[in-house]
Image: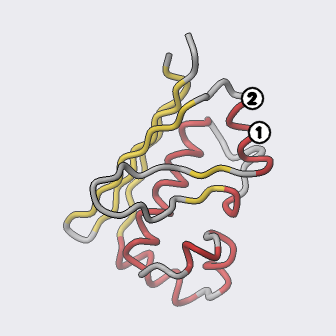
Amino acid sequence: MIVGIGVDMVDIARFEGHVAGSPRLMQRLFTPHEQELPLRSLAVRYAAKEALIKALGGSDGVSWQEIEVPRNGERQAPRYVLTGETARTVAARGAVRQHLSLSHDGGFALAYAVLEGDA
């Protein structure tokens, strides 16, 4: 049973401009592991976090720092690692599995999230 679906698209150049103009944004939006990645990779992770929030129907009980999209390497599906209150919020909304798809094309980053619950 699908609990929620979310999608988000980020203009990579615009995202890079926001990060350059507000250095504290990196610490607010990304975990220490994510902060080591190039800005292009961070743009798609930002989209992934936004897609998850949309799939949940809002950001209540969600912290950016408690959502991580780790670098899995080639031929491994992207995934969320949720911790703390965010993990409890996702579970409380009935989601037992999270599915994530990421893409880059033409200067844009796209993320699509599906939250699945038990029937």
105, above or below 22, in the image:
above
Q: Is residue 79 rendered to the left or right of residue 32?
A: left
> Distance of mark 1 from mark 2, alpha carbons?
6 Å
Pointer 2: what residue?
Answer: 92
Where is residue 15? Give x, y as percent. Answer: 44, 75
Which residue is most to the top? 119
Q: Amino acid at mark 1?
A: Arg
Q: Amino acid at mark 2?
A: Ala
62, above or below 21, in the image:
above
Q: Residue at x 55, y 10 (%)?
A: 119
Instruction: Mark 1 and mark 2 in contact? Answer it, CB < 8 Å.
Output: yes
Pointer 1: what residue?
Answer: 88
Q: Is residue 28 rendered to the left or right of residue 70?
A: right
Quick one: 53 or 31, which is closer to the camera?
A: 31
Q: Is residue 2 rendered to the left or right of residue 28?
A: left
Q: Residue at x 57, y 16 (%)?
A: 118
Where is residue 47? Give x, y as percent. Answer: 46, 58
Quick one: 36 or 62, which is closer to the camera?
A: 36
Q: Secondary structure at mark 1?
A: helix
Q: How many marks?
A: 2
38, above or below 71, in the image:
below
Label 2 environment density (alpha carbons within 10 Å; few <14, some 14–19, many ≥20) = few
Q: Is residue 42 rendered to the left or right of residue 57?
A: left
Where is residue 109? Give x, y as percent. Answer: 34, 62
Q: Residue at x 53, y 53 (%)?
A: 50
Q: Residue at x 68, y 36 (%)?
A: 90
Could you say which disc has been placed on residue 111 in the image? none
